[in-house]
Amino acid sequence: DQQVKQNSPSLSVQEGRISILNCDYTNSMFDYFLWYKKYPAEGPTFLISISSIKDKNEDGRFTVFLNKSAKHLSLHIVPSQPGDSAVYFCAARDRGSTLGRLYFGRGTQLTVWP
Amino acid sequence: DAGITQSPRYKITETGRQVTLMCHQTWSHSYMFWYRQDLGHGLRLIYYSAAADITDKGEVPDGYVVSRSKTENFPLTLESATRSQTSVYFCASLGLAGGQETQYFGPGTRLLVL
């Protein structure tokens, strides 16, 4: 039973434009959300996070939006660059579960073309 | 090397053989995790550990054994490898980024069971 869902397995965007990656969750106990980026043959690397007490967090070209009522979050990348091409995983922490345990979505492959 | 490392990076084995995947971190993080990544499933938690000699099952623990005799090491053993265990395995440890917890991942071990 997937508690974190990324319904788009792939996304293709032109360089310079905005990339929007979406994530839905079902568990209302999730209190902290993260995005990870993964290049081929490497481990996932932490990108940006947001606490459930906020609805927006920004870090340079990356912004994460959280809509708690819809149980939805999104990652915006503006402007997109070819180096952003990677798999992006959405993850969430359940405040009632083991410290640090994360639940991951299946990932979205982002391709940024010139 | 500083950070989190995994060995071997690639492994081919045969059905029924025992295989051990190694994970080492230099941060002295208490929490460590093992995931497998499969197409269509994202990252699934196999086992995790809260400290030396404290381990617990994740979502998909069957066929795997872990140990944690030292804080910095968290080996994962496939006691009798099966073809369904062909996967990419990631080790992670829990640390802080910007004051918030996040998991730091190793580069992964790609395992092929023939």
Image (tube, rainbow, N blue to C red):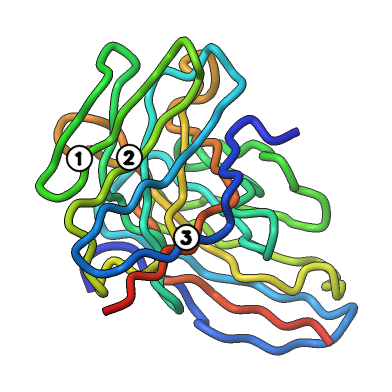
Q: CA distance from mark 1 to mark 3?
A: 28 Å
Q: Which residue is mark 3?
A: A11
Look at the numbered disc 1 and give the secondary structure of its residue: strand
CB under 8 Å between discs 3 and 2: no
Q: Chain of mark 3?
A: A
Depth order, front residue of A34/A73:
A73
* Residue B107 visible in this rendered orientation of the protein: yes
Residue, x 13% and y 42% (percent of image)? A59
Q: Earlier in the sequence, mark 1 or mark 2?
A: 1
Q: Amino acid at mark 2?
A: Thr
Q: CA distance from mark 3 to mark 2?
A: 26 Å
- Residue A38, quarter of the rendered image: bottom left
- Structural crowding at the residue carrying mark 2, measured as other residues with C-alpha within 10 Å and reported as few (<14), some (14–19) or many (≥20): many
- Up-down relation of residue A7 to residue B114 (above or below): above
Q: Which residue is mark 1?
A: B97
Q: Which residue is mark 2?
A: B102
Q: Is residue A54 left or right of residue A36?
A: left
Q: Is residue A11 left or right of residue A83?
A: right
Q: Are marks 3 and 2 on the same chain?
A: no
Q: Are marks 1 and 2 on the same chain?
A: yes
Q: Chain of mark 1?
A: B
Q: Position of residue A54 (x, y in %)?
A: 25, 16
CB under 8 Å between discs 1 and 3: no
Q: Chain of mark 2?
A: B
CB under 8 Å between discs 1 and 2: yes
- Up-down relation of residue A22 to residue A113 (above or below): above
Q: Quadrant of the N terminus of chain B?
A: bottom left
